Image (cartoon, helix red, strand yellow):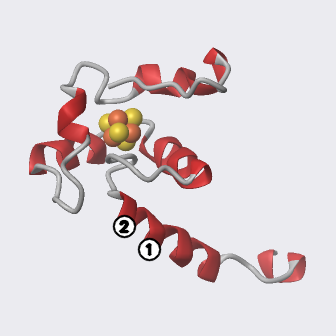
Amino acid sequence: MRLLTAAAAPDEHRWQDLGGCTDSDPEAFFPKSGADPDNAVRKICAACPVRETCLVDAIGRGEEFGVWGGLTHAERLVEARRRRIRAPRTAQEAL
Ligand code: SF4
């Protein structure tokens, strides 16, 4: 699976070339709305060397479709919220 947005420069998404899904069926990563992805998809993402980059990129883009970073859209919304909650409130707190 390798998807580029029309606005993205090719170099911005070079990490996708390292994804564990590069030789996988893209449709497996885009289950029907509300359906859970196959365990095989979850396993590929769990072992992917660019999982975190993929997840952060999808959250940052507000990607609504497909499995990115091993998570569905609904799961990414929860993860995005969790990360904001855990983020330090002040620079002092971050130290
Ligand atoms: S985390 Fe999953 S969807 Fe993202 S690049 Fe890796 S295998 Fe592909």
Residue beneath disc 2: 74
Residue beneath disc 1: 78
Are there few (<14), some (14-19), or many (20+) residues within 10 Å of tag 2? Answer: few
Question: Compared to 63, does 11 lie above or below?
Answer: above
> Which amino acid type corresponds to the residue marked 2 in the rendered image?
Ala
Taking depth in this image into account, of 95 and 77 the one nearest to the observer is 77
**Quadrant that contains the C terminus:** bottom right
Mark 1 touching mark 2, by CB under 8 A?
yes
Is residue 14 rendered to the left or right of residue 46? right
Question: Compared to 75, does 62 lie above or below?
Answer: above
| Dot 2: element | helix
Residue at 55% in and 51% down: 56
Taking depth in this image into account, of 19 and 76 the one nearest to the observer is 76
Is residue 90 rendered to the left or right of residue 20? right
Residue 64 tag number? none
In which quadrant of the rendered view does residue 20 lie?
Answer: top left
Tell me which image quadrant ligand 1 sits in.
Answer: top left
In the image, the residue with mark 2 has its CB under 8 Å from the nearest atom of ligand 1: no
What percent of the width, then of the height, locates residue 80? 53, 68
